[in-house]
Each structure stands twice: as C-alpha cells, then as structure tokens.
Amino acid sequence: MPKSILIVGAGLSGAVIGRTLAEAGHRVTIWDARDHPGGNCHTERDAETGVMVHVYGPHIFHTDDEEVWSYITGFGRFMPYKNRVKTTSNGQVFSLPVNLHTINQFFGKTLRPDEARAFIETQADTSITDPQTFEDQALRFVGRDLYEAFFKGYTIKQWGCSPTDLPASILKRLPVRFNYDDNYFFHKFQGMPEDGYTAIIERILDHPGITLRLKTRFDGSQRGDADHLFYSGPLDGYYGYDLGRLGYRTLDFDRFTYDGDYQGCAVMNYGEEAVPYTRITEHKHFSPWETHEKSVCYREYSRACGADDIPYYPIRMVEEKALLAEYADRAAAETGVTFVGRLGTYRYLDMDVTIREALDTARLFLSVEADGGSMPAFVYPPL
C-alpha cells in the first residue's frame, strides 16, 4: 500500500531516501527552505567567470564504498580528481598532508622514508603516552615544530578555541605519510561531477513519485497527513531550540576574482594564526578538465554559528554532548519521524557516508513496512 512520505531537506540525505522510497511506489514530498536542492553540496556557474563554484565551500567525493560509488555515478559522470592541498607557513608553501616532501623541505633534509620515520620519532614528545587533547596528539606524533607550523594556528581559527580544549580524535583524521604521496585522500574511488553536484541531486530527485517544494520552511506542526517524516534539518530546530542551541561553527566567504591563475591549486591553507582566514579556495581547479581565463576565489573564515547562520561543523564538546543527549532522548520517544543526515544526527558526515546512511535508512523503512513494524527515531544514533 503506497504511503505518503514527507522529507524535510533536499540535500543528499533527503534526495537519496526520497528516490529509494519513490522507486518502491511511495508518494514522496520533499521540502527545503532554500531556493535550490543540494544542501551544502550546491554548485552553480559563476556568472562573471563561468567557473563551476561550490557555493557553500568545496566538496570532493571520495569513498571505498563500491555501492555508493556506483549509485552516485549512475546519476552523472564523475571526472578524475585528486585533492592536493597546499599550505603557506612562515613564508613558504608546503604540501599537505604532512608527507616526506613536507618533512624534508621543512627541516632542510633529504631523508628516505625509514630515516624520516625515525627522525620524526625524535621530534615527538614520547612522554605523552595517552593523548587526550588535539595538542597532545600532535605533539606525540609530529612534535612541536610541525605542530606549530601546520596545525596549531589553523586549528585555533577553525574551531575558535585552544587545541588543548579539543579532543585528540579530531587529529586522528590527519595522516602523516612517509612517502611523496600528496593526495589528501586515500580512498579507492575519487572524483568530481562533471556538471556539478546540484545537477546530480536534481537527477536523483527527477522521479514522478517525488514532489519538490523549495523555499518552504518546516516546523513540527506541519506534518499534515504524512504517514512518515524523515527530517534532515537541525535536531534542536525540530523542537524550536527550546532546550538551547547545539553548537556549530559556520563559515564566511570573501569572494574575489583574478585574471589568470591566482594560486595554482584548488586549496591553499594558511597555518599561521596571524592570518585571519583559514584558507583560499580557487574553484576553477576543482574542474581541471575545463579552461577559464578568469578565476574566482574565496577566502574562508570560520566563526561561531549564530541563529541566522548556516551550520557547518558540529562542535560536539562536553556541553554540546550533554544538550544533545537531552534532545536525543526526546526524539527517541517520537513516533512517525526519523532524524537523518548531518544536522538531524548532529554529526560530521562525508558525502559517501551520507549516501550510505540514507540508503540504509530507506531500505530499513521498506523492510519495517513489509513486516508491519515501526521505524526508530534514529537509524544512526547521534551519541
């Protein structure tokens, strides 16, 4: 029996869930407060330069999940793309992640991989046996010099607090390589959509069983006669923030154009705290198969997210986790609603993980429906 499904949010989570359920015969309506689908993955052509711009900051698709790669490439051609990040520090340009080239350049050496590994161990603070903070983790694995050049200032700007206040787990995502591999990611499948992410998501949404309503805001009283609601908006926003707001970082972008090639790479980080922005992104380098005479760039600034800002990165510090637990307990008591995605579960999610979780969630709904059961509020709990 077809059911009426309401989905809040036309980003990857909402689009993939909606498409899967529509293909199964359900009637799907998707609402989004913005005037475009795609969420923070939204891309569009810059009117002045013709460059494909990642409007809410760059997104590079990378995954080891073969099914997810097959799924997303089924809706558009992906071009080969490797994310090679550079960083400016102390008047020099270095390669990130920290690799053999970075180490040799920074210390003025010509070390082989085994020599570099032994050398970095002499730089590391081996007295730290159980790193608890971001700073502890960095000092233990790369030592003070590399930490202060590449991680400390950038982290203070990105998170708005001392690295001694951040958990060690944040730095575990940043590898140190003892070879010359400067590909930022190490996944089997990597690429960039030829026509941009919005075109991909529009194709996912292009199904007769899906009705898309843009510029349509949602509050908890608007479920109407929907049999089930999938909510990918902010978890605290679903409850009108009545217990308080979960903490996020947001981004400000300072756009400028340049005749020619401004920096020679897509992403240039700035590791020094004295430089107010965290990085400059030059968007024509995200589409290296295209040719553009002019360039459009964005200086990126991170700050605390206010009530009217776009939330980007969940902070998930001790206070936020306590408030999150209250909202999660409240949500767990709900019936007929499932919270999904980055905002709905208050977690940082890469695009491939978002698609994987959306597919799993939609398939669970179909299984539960067939068995006459009910969906949980969280398929992927936030805690």
Image (cartoon, rainbow, N blue to C red):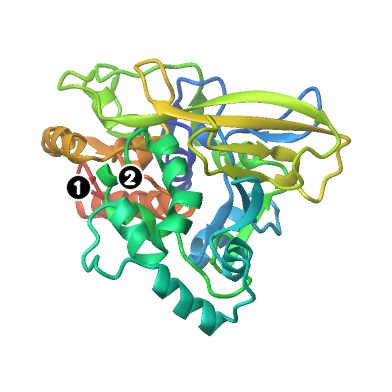
User: In the image, residue 316 lies at what x, y percent?
Assistant: 26, 40
Crowding near the residue tagged with mark 1, few <14, some 14–19, many ≥20 C-alpha atoms within 10 Å: few
Which amino acid, mark 1? Leu
Secondary element under disc 1, as helix, strand or loop, is loop
Name the residue tied to disc 1: 383
In this view, the residue in front, 119 or 228, is 119
Name the residue tied to disc 2: 163
Is residue 129 toward the left or the right of residue 177 in the image? left
User: In the image, residue 261 lies at what x, y percent?
Assistant: 82, 40
Secondary element under disc 2, as helix, strand or loop, is helix
Is residue 62 toward the left or the right of residue 324 in the image? right
- Please tell me whether residue 367 is drawn above or below residue 210 in the rendered image: below
Quarter of the image for residue 247 reads top left
- Please tell me whether residue 32 is drawn above or below residue 228 in the rendered image: above
Crowding near the residue tagged with mark 2, few <14, some 14–19, many ≥20 C-alpha atoms within 10 Å: many
User: In the image, residue 116 lies at what x, y percent?
Assistant: 52, 77
Residue at horizontal 48%, vertical 44%? 19
Q: Quadrant of the N terminus?
A: top left
Report how many numbered discs are placed on residues in the image: 2
Q: Are marks 1 and 2 in contact (CB under 8 Å)?
A: no
Residue at horizontal 42%, vertical 55%? 356
In this view, the residue in front, 79 or 175, is 175
User: In the image, residue 335 lies at what x, y percent?
Assistant: 16, 35
Q: What is the CA distance from the residue labelled 1 to the residue labelled 2?
A: 23 Å
Q: Is residue 223 visible?
A: yes
